[in-house]
Image (cartoon, rainbow, N blue to C red):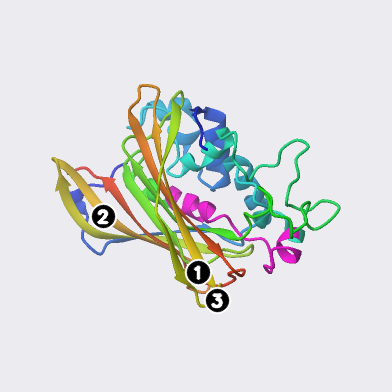
Amino acid sequence: MAAERFPVEASHIMMFARSVYDDNPVYYDAEYAAGTEAGAIIAPPTFMQAAAQFDPAWPLRPRINQPWFGSGANPSGIDPDTKSENGGNAGTLHAEQHFEYHRHPRVGDVLCATVLPGRTWEKEGRRAGKLIFNETITEYRDQGGELAVTVRGVGVRTERPATQNQE
Amino acid sequence: MALKASELVVGDTHSESLVQDLKRTQLVQYAGASGDYNPLHTDELYTREVAGYPSVFAHGMLTMGMTGAMLARYVGDGRLTKFGVRFTAQVWPGDDLQATATVESLREEDGVSLVDLKVSTTNQNGSEVLSGYAVARVDP
């Protein structure tokens, strides 16, 4: 699944920029941004990651009255032996991320994500056991159907926690 | 402020401190803004007792986001055309991070001047936590 409708909003950009310690006014001051080459408040370089907020099936967000694998009364809200949609994500780490900017999205854009099939491959790691890599390519198109950003992510599933460098 | 090809030399570097003594609260901020609520980044109890890590650790995308902030300050707003990384080690609360961009080449493509940058982010021990590249439009 992916975000079918990802509205690029000013307050979301401001909060995202704050969270990556980016105090560039082009991300929160519309008047300042209008006077820059960008011409408007634009999305910070990795902002497409926040499309998760608009993905109805995004698995790493707790849902009302659904089991969640984080702690509450117990260290996990899900029996670790039970395989469930939200129980199996902790073993997946982020290995790579690539952005290609055809243009930088700006406040007011409404993007639509299309997920293209990616590759899967395996490798034997020194510390974390067998590593299974899985690639996802996502194209973000604007309200006019023009390609704005292409994102390629690679996740890796590990047999054991990888507490040092990933191989 | 954009970079000028005429003022860049292969091997030039730009380096910035991204964060000192990374706080768990910043991981919470990033979780909220990005929507990635994986408990591995914010839930110490789960992360130690169920996932088996010594503590919560930063989202790879937080390190990439802070590194991207450095890049955009260096090359100018909206000038990046590509930015890609591999996450080579985990980032933990308390870490200090430093990011460096190094000019690898200057070229023209379809009449547009571009700079190829090598990107590296390291921690307080000098270990690389992120390794990547960026391409940006520059003025002639």
Q: Hey, what amino acid is under mark 3?
A: Arg
Q: Do labels 2 and 1 share a chain?
A: no
Q: Residue furthest bottom?
A: A126
- Residue hosting label 2: B116
Distance of label 3 from label 2 (alpha carbons): 33 Å
What whole-number distance in Å separates the C-alpha atoms at marks 2 and 1? 26 Å
Q: How far apart are marks 3 and 1 (CA)?
A: 8 Å
Badge 1 amino acid: Gln
- The residue depicted at 20 percent of the width and 52 percent of the height is B7
Residue under the point 82% across and 51% down: A72
Q: In which quarter of the image is residue A129?
A: bottom right
- The residue that disc 1 covers is A166
Left or right, B29 with respect to A32, comes to: right
Nearer the observer, disc 3 or disc 2?
Answer: 3
- The part of the chain drawn in magenta is B46-69
Q: Categorize mark 2 by other alpha carbons within 10 Å: few (<14), some (14-19), many (20+).
A: some
Up the image or down, A30 lies above or below A103; here it is: above
Chain where mark 3 sits: A
